[in-house]
Amino acid sequence: MHYDTMLIDTHTHLFMEPLRDDLDGVLARAAAAGVRGCVVPAYDLESWAAIRSLADRENVHVAGGLHPWVAQQPWDELQLGSQLQDTAAVAVGEIGLDFKVPDYDPVRQIDTFRRQLAVAVDLDLPVILHNRGAFEEMADILDEFKGAVRGVLHAYSRGPELAERFLGLGLHLAFGGTITRPGARRARRSAAMIPEDRLLLETDSPAIGLHDILPENTEPRHVRNVAAAMADLRGTNLEHIAKVTSDNARRLFKLP
Ligand SMILES: [Zn+2]
């Protein structure tokens, strides 16, 4: 089966196992499923190196940043800036705050986050945001950058009230496999109601699975399943969801 619908997976870690072991296959299956773009965020110094070989692949767009899990890795603005420029990165990310990891250092996380937001503003790039357990803290910091930072809060799974706060900051929200789970009521309510022009789709493969697909078996092609779930929740069809989310992704990340 070959589909002509255009879909964009705005968050997939193609440099991770098992995806990297069968990259040609993964990308061919994605293309056959109508996926015309994959945004691949690198999140630590090791993956910054790994995405250099991905940057030339057709339909692959890379991003780079320091994840809050590795906020203690030594880095500086010059180094991040040249990584982003060398790989023609489409975003700074993924970056953010995670106050649910054990032994986190909030001061370090906030410092690394804030400095990367400044890099994004300098280079006029959008940001890809990760957040667990620190939504208020993140929203307050983003408030300082309001109007200057654009981007996406990825793997959004919280309710509509919190969504409003981030929409108010001008952000997009990306939904993934979570909305295919019948029990994910909060995420599904949000997916049903946020404005069409702020919606993005992602798989976060291979980190998050779908209702009927294990994380390690998830690939960019499954963004099609996410689009189908989104269409159901919003009472529309997959073609419409594919069009609006792809338009949004292309506009936000300035994709060809
Ligand atoms: Zn990720």
Image (tube, helix red, strand yellow):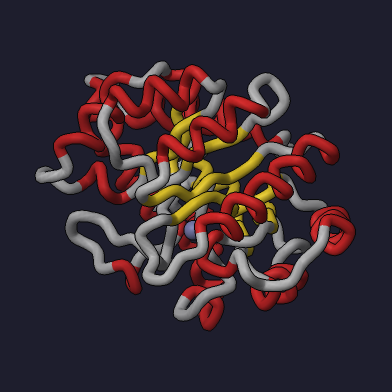
- Please provide percent x and percent y for residue 198: 48, 24
- Of residue 1 and residue 156, the one placed in the foreground of this image is 156
Query: Would residue 251 be visible to someone looking at this image?
Result: no
- Please provide percent x and percent y for residue 202: 44, 47
- Please provide percent x and percent y for residue 24: 58, 72
- At x 66%, y 55%, the residue is 112
- Of residue 27 and residue 209, the one placed in the foreground of this image is 209
Q: Is residue 181 left or right of residue 239?
A: left
- At x 69%, y 58%, the residue is 64
Is residue 181 placed above or below 145 in the rendered structure?
A: below
Can you tell which quarter of the image residue 70 is in? bottom right
- At x 58%, y 45%, the residue is 128
- At x 47%, y 62%, the residue is 29
Is residue 10 placed above or below 42 in the rendered structure?
A: above
> Looking at this rendering, what residue extends furthest in the left direction?
183
**Which quarter of the rendered picture does the C terminus lie within?**
top right
Q: Is residue 234 left or right of residue 254?
A: left
Q: How many marks?
A: 0
- Please provide percent x and percent y for residue 40: 60, 57
Can you tell which quarter of the image residue 41 is in? bottom right
Query: Would residue 206 be visible to someone looking at this image?
Result: yes
> Looking at this rendering, what residue extends furthest in the bottom direction?
21
- Of residue 65 and residue 72, the one placed in the foreground of this image is 72
Q: Is residue 98 left or right of residue 255?
A: left
> Looking at this rendering, what residue extends furthest in the front direction?
107
- Of residue 36 and residue 182, the one placed in the foreground of this image is 182
